[in-house]
Image (cartoon, grey):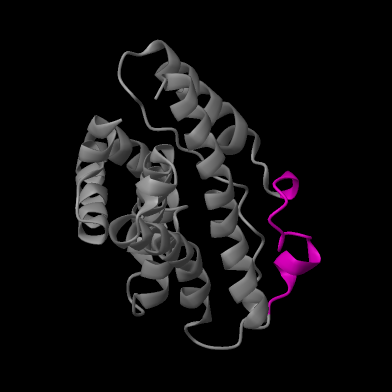
Amino acid sequence: MENSQLLFFQLAILVPSVILHEVSHGFVANALGDPTAKNAGRLTMNPIPHIDPFGSVILPLFLAFLSAISPTRGIILGWAKPVPINPANLRGRYDELKVSMAGPASNILLALIFGLALRFLPVASIHPTLVLVFAYIVFLNILLAVFNLIPIPPLDGSHILLTLLPKGFEQLKMFLAQYGFILLLFLIFFFFPAILAIVNFIFEMIVGESIISFLLQQ
């Protein structure tokens, strides 16, 4: 498959995946008593209300450009605009935790559906290209889930961590709030290969083969 086709497939997979991630946050929040996202018109798969200028447009196009001029096949990433959540409307003690988990859980569910289909159904007999499309759906959604579960602000993992931390960790909370973005950049620059290794491990657990083997088959 040509590089331009791969880029198109990645973008076509990324956009609904990140939108589903955010809609899931808003859907669970609404079910738990916070209609903020619903009132803002964010419980929709229509991409327009979810567009983040940098995460949804600039970054994916920049990475697509780098992939197009590179001899290697790059990974296109991005994000949608976070849905608004008002914690004051949430009733239960762990409602914020449930809302935070909803986004990564939606990506894992999507990865499981397409991954198990890839593993146990004759996808290649329908069309050979579907194999690569399904593989990218699984890989990108696992990547979105794993990356968002990192406990560094503003990622979902930080909200999960702060919800579970007992009283007495206020200094840690302040440190993460103050230096979270710097820590996140450090992690991306120096530990992204480790993140990809974790993603590929989960991919192989679901599908039975590594993502590399699927790419080599194309």
Residue drawn at the location 41% of the way across and 57% of the way down:
114
Report x, y in % for residue 59.
52, 29
**40 magenta-colored:** yes
Q: Nearer the viewer, residue 169 or 90?
A: 90
**217 magenta-colored:** no
Q: Which residue ends up furthest to the bottom in the rendered image?
A: 92
Q: Please say if 83 is above or below 195.
A: below
Report x, y in % for residue 134.
41, 48
Name the side, left or right, on which 47 lies relative to 215: right
Residue 191 appears in view: no
Residue 215: image quadrant is top left
Q: Which residue ends up furthest to the top in the rendered image?
A: 69
Q: Which residues are magenta?
A: 34-49
Residue drawn at the location 74% of the way across and 44% of the way down:
48
Name the side, left or right, on which 115 lies relative to 58: left
Q: Please say if 108 is above or below 154.
A: below
Residue 212 appears in view: yes
Identify the image quadrant of the N terminus.
Answer: top left
Residue 184: image quadrant is top left
| Main SS class of the magenta portion in the image | loop
Identify the image quadrant of the C terminus.
Answer: top left
Residue drawn at the location 78% of the way across and 60% of the way down:
41
Report x, y in % for residue 2.
42, 20
Residue drawn at the location 33% of the way across and 43% of the way down:
183
Q: Nearer the viewer, residue 21 or 1?
A: 1
Report x, y in % for residue 104.
43, 62
